[in-house]
Image (cartoon, rainbow, N blue to C red):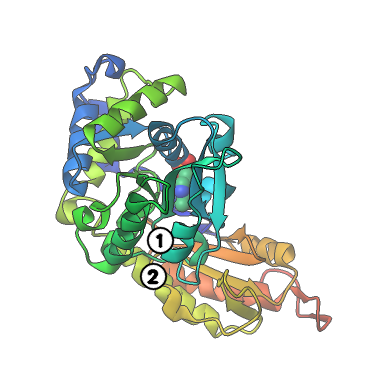
Amino acid sequence: MRTIDLRSDTVTKPTPEMRRAMAEAEVGDDVFHDDPTVIALEERAAELLGKEAGLFVASGTMGNLVAELAHVARGQEIIAGRQSHVVLDEAAGHAVVAGASVRTIEERADGTLDPTAVRESFRDPTDEHQPITGLVVIENCHAHTMNQPLTPAYTAEIAAVAHAGHGTAPGVPLHVDGARFWNAVVALGVSPAELAGPADSVSFCLSKGLACPVGSVVVGRRDVIWRARRARKLLGGGLRQVGVLAAAGLIALRDGPAGMIERLAEDHANARRLAEAIAELDGVESAGDIAQPQPGAFDPARVTTNFVLFRVRRDRAAFLEAAAARGVLLDSYPHDQVRAVTHHGIEPGDVTAAVIAIRDALAATHDPRSGRHAHAGVAG
Ligand SMILES: Cc1ncc(COP(=O)(O)O)c(C=O)c1O
């Protein structure tokens, strides 16, 4: 039985072309700025996003942390969404390493922050009791709200609020956690430079939908990236002949069908088809709407990138086990949701097979509210 792994787009493996490029990469000591492949990747990323400079880092988490360290002084505060990765899923690096507190704002159902709430979250710098606001962070795509893409107009609006400050509080930079930035670019049909333009720094992952084995890139002004580079050193992230990893990134960021960016549209189409089919299944409860986490209609129209978030009227752990027994790996996600993520290597035929397995897993799993328990075991 072929396993259809929909847990995350992080499970993607490097393509044969990436592996060849990695094997043949010209390398040098990147701590001495001597690795031509890393330099080429950083320049390519900066060029694509319309920024002065780039920095290759080990992971999305490291990208966000070096950006925080570049922007924020100890004792300052970061304004961010309550359901964002930097707040929930990065082991509190902002507090542990950067020495910054976080002031959270509830995201709206489309993953955006209310600009007025951002403005009003600035602290009063004339009050000695309060932390000092130092940074605004947004996440694009916004994972917890169905990985929805946020537009350039929204990014510009939040950047304007961040840069303006509030009352006596001076303006601060805007960092975009763009772990799935390229999914937003493709879903919205905008240029990466337009989407990144208003931000002072953007980090994006190579190791998710772009299918590279390792790495993220942070881009921004030259002075910001210099501070991020220093922060990367502090974190032990100054690597040596790391062109072997950057080489895969250069393959991914090529223009057109030779690269991995355009291809993301296939993942989005597969996710939409998966969502439409899941919405029809008996036992599926509601959409992944964190703003209204009550039961409601599952709306596949909200699936515009590669995440399908849904709830099941079943014991969730048992359902996930039943799906795995049928060859489909899904992930549990906050608010009692199940996550299915499409990615490189998932073909339309896999979507069809996954829907059948999910249908059968639902049928085979206990509904705790009705006491209903359909047939057990792996269906044919
Ligand atoms: C929105 C978001 N930001 C950052 C990250 C961190 O990426 P990494 O797992 O490479 O540290 C992730 C990972 O899933 C993510 O979803």
Residue type, label 1: Ile
**Residue 235: percent from left, percent from top:** 47, 23
In the rendered structure, the answer to whether residue 373 lies left or right of residue 353 reads right
* Callout 2 touching callout 1 (CB < 8 Å): yes
Q: Is residue 205 at least partly visible in the picture?
A: no
Q: Nearer the viewer, mark 2 or mark 1?
A: 2
* Residue that numbered label 2 is attached to: 270
In the rendered structure, the answer to whether residue 290 lies left or right of residue 38 reads right
Residue at 42 percent across and 48 percent down: it is 168
**Residue 359: percent from left, percent from top:** 60, 77
Res 332 → quadrant: bottom right
Secondary element type, mark 2 = helix
Answer above or below: position of 321 versus 94: below
Nearer-the-camera pick, 92 or 242? 92
Answer above or below: position of 196 versus 247: below
* Residue that numbered label 1 is attached to: 346
Q: Is residue 274 at least partly visible in the picture?
A: yes
Residue type, label 2: Asn
In the rendered structure, the answer to whether residue 103 lies left or right of residue 64 reads right
Cα separation, mark 2 vs mark 1, equals 8 Å
